Image (cartoon, rainbow, N blue to C red):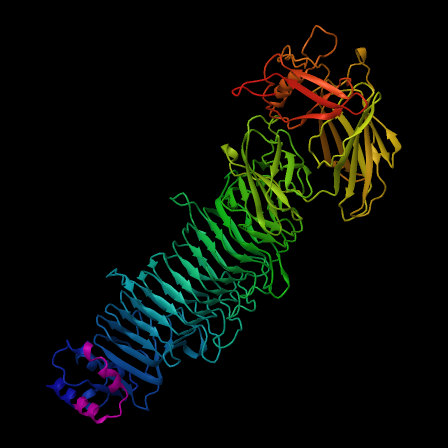
Amino acid sequence: MLKHSLLQLFRRHFTQRTANPCRKRLRHMDQKLDHLEDRTLLASFIVNSEASDGGDPQGGVITLRGAIDLANGNPGLDQITFSPSVIRIADGFSSVITDAVDIDGAGKVTIPSGFLNHGVLSVEGHTGTSIRNLIFEQRPGRGSIVLEGGGSHTVTGNRFEPLSGGFGTRVGVEILSSDGNQIGGNSAGDRNVFVGLGIGVRITEDTSAKTTSEGNFITGNLIGVKADGTVQANSLGIELGNSKATTIEANVISGNGTPIVIQDVAIETKVTNNRIGLAAASETAVPNFNPVTIAGNNSVVSGNVISGNFASGILISGNGNKLTGNKIGTNSDGSAAIPNEVGVEIIGKAATNEVGPGNVIVANASSAAVEISVEPTDSFLDGNSVEGNTIGLNSGQTAKLGGRHGILVRRGTGTVIIENVIGGLSGNGIVLLGQTNFSGEGFVVTDTFITDNTIGLVSPDGPILGNLEHGILIGSNVDRTTIGSTEIQPGDFSNDISFSGKSGIRIEENKQDDGTIAAPGRHAVNGNLIFDNGGLPIDTGVPGVNPQDVPDSDGFLNQPVIRSIREGSTIVQGELNVASGKYVLEFFDALGGFLHRESLTIVDPIADRTFSVTIPGNFEEDVSATLTRLDADLNGTTSESADIRLLPVDLKIKGTYESDNNFGGVDRGETIPSGDQINVISLPVGSIHQYTVEVVNRDDEARVIQLNAQVDDVEGWIPQFFVNLSPITSQITGAGFKTALLQPGESQIVIVEIESQNTSENGLPVIDEGDLFNVTIEAKVDGATPFETVDAVQAVARAGLFVNSSLDAPDADLDDGVPDADPNMKGQQLTLRSAIQFANTIGADPNSNARLVVGFELAPNDGVITILSKTHGPLPIITSNLSIDGTELIQPGPSEVKIFGQEMNENEHGL
């Protein structure tokens, strides 16, 4: 009867409060109340006493505990408000709420927490309670508000702060095995303030129920700072234990010991649009001491500003977490730096975490924006990735914001670094540097993939935004790195590595903790655009260009040696001082990136060492080449870059002139590109062979060019050099000929004359008819260091075949290598038939492209040289590169050559 009378009293009081603002809100909850029985009206209770006990409701004394007891006894959603005289509830208060109630303190009622082992307000086993606009005075003990079981409660507009500005150890709001609760809200009136606490908000399991708390929201709260900007730290802002799908959104979490901890039993957490480490209403740093710590799995961290913190912005040790669209170490719009010590740090056995896309990350002047140091997992690859971020720059990628390094990997397998823009750093863009736990541990950074990044750039506004040290630095204990891709097509590129203060890519020696140098790892560098860096594009081993070690045993692949380049074309010739195996030779320029890829197989390191590659298109400046091994244990090893800029000296053979001492000279008047093969008519003893060579200074400084000439395969030929047909010097060996001082672009014509000094029996030619000889003319830059050949031209000459018999007879022996139709006669007897046969034989040589000339050495009869072809049928089919030239005559005087053949039927060859 007492309870029934009291309910009538309070219902009568409630119906008289027609202006009660809760009634509109309560009408929206009709669906939730349909299941409640024996309800005709919701009750409202007004607290009029500050006492902490149960009060005297029958006598009209309503305390907060008494009102809660009444609401618990009245099924359905009731309301509790406070009379104006109630300011502060007395010490020792606590209560358990077991049925839905809306408690509204109007922002002026303080509840002391007391020294309790349970919550001041414990909400247990039901749904729909709302606790609003109260001030909780914190003292040591358990949470001020504990939501245990049930769910769908709201906690909004409350302040949780310590007594008299002190420091509390209590939890503000604790959620235990309860789902769908809302802590805070999107409006200023809904946000809670958590300051000076042990923990602001904690979500975990009820230790007895051991069930996950799921789908809770922590939204719009001030955690560690007050609305007026006053900082009052919590030891920990938000802690998530056994929970699933918690949303932490639009909070200001600053000035705390640790802003957020997501434990390893928490999964699928969303951390979005929070300000962590900054003031609520300005871009002023309000640092947290420790990072946002994520040990749980499959969290999504997006759209946050995490800046100004003393440690890392984010520390990840869980798996499958994603960071997208955050400003980490900058202000809200990413235009200015407010750095954390480290931006993002991944540690422990973390795997498959994704940093990016869309993050802007800046660290302080001594740290990295992203640092990865993870232990091996049960799977082969850890698979953490850093993708699509802006590092060291503002969000518009137009200005430097600083930091030491971009991405630093100390330990880890299968790290993927892709599509990041990295610039403006005082150190390196990307660093792989294995950090071992004990001496001899070996490679601890393995299988790293670095593709499609921009490391150093020019801002659209003009400034160069490079990194002061290397674009990519690979240090000790690192193996199987892939930088770029072998799938890149000509005209495209993978990584763009530019404007570094030192090398584009630096691969150091594998120095161990005890000071010894171990074998280096394997690092493939393919398809990248590397230009305009302060050092080498790729620098391996000791700093600077490595000497060619033969047989390439130091673990670093020898770079290609470029021997010649033809101006006006893209033919590159050189050699490879490497072991047998499969390789790929790649060429790059500074404008179009990857130019050409040539696959090579070296079976014999000596015989197969030279190469000649034709690249489509035209050369630009700053062309480079690299060599990568593709097989065996050295798979993936790439050499240093070989600079193949157009050489500072260009030699061109402009023409040749041949003479012998009996019949004067024959001026062939040919213009021959560098390296092409030419022909000579005959080279008897005392013959002179001349080359007209143009020497061009292509350097950007004035140069004196030194020339040397030599004839290979034969002895006794003396080179002489002429300028304006005046002899300058004669030599077989020595310092060579020096041009005048040539200005950039200036050229000089030099006549190089080769004369045979040999004597031979019966005056026969020193070079037999049909034989080859090579003349090589080399150029060096006088005084240059190292003093190496910078260009060379080679004329491959073949002595001609001269018909000296008008008879029709075949070659006596095609296998003896001598063009002779009648070995019984003194000297070589060469008929037209035997000349064609011999030409076909030597023309079959695949290494020879020389055009062989067949001329005539017969005395004319009335100006006619008559050749018979009637005895042995048709002349042989011509299968070689052959010129039968009736104007190539040894005997003086005008003549014509006539060939007479017999009549043939229609099924036989003609002449």
Quarter location, residue 66 = bottom left
| Viewer-closest of 894 and 152 | 894
Q: Is 712 above or below relative to 506? A: above
Which quadrant, please, contains the C terminus? top right
Pinpoint residue 695: horizontal percent, then vertical percent.
78, 40
Pinpoint residue 550: horizontal percent, then vertical percent.
64, 29
Pinpoint residue 393: horizontal percent, then vertical percent.
56, 63
Residue 546 visible (yes or no): yes
Magenta: main secondary structure equals: helix
Queried whether the magenta region covers residue 779, the answer comes back as no
Q: Residue furthest left?
A: 1
Q: Residue furthest top?
A: 824
Q: Is 96 above or below relative to 600? A: below
Pinpoint residue 497: horizontal percent, then vertical percent.
59, 52
Queried whether the magenta region covers residue 18, the answer comes back as yes
**For this view, does 569 lie left or right of residue 178?**
right
| Viewer-closest of 642 and 433 | 642
Q: Residue at x 21, y 74 (%)?
A: 98
Quarter location, residue 612 = top right
| Viewer-closest of 899 and 172 | 899
Residue range corresponding to the magenta coloring: 9-31
**For this view, does 772 lie left or right of residue 515?**
right
**For this view, does 465 lie left or right of residue 654?**
left
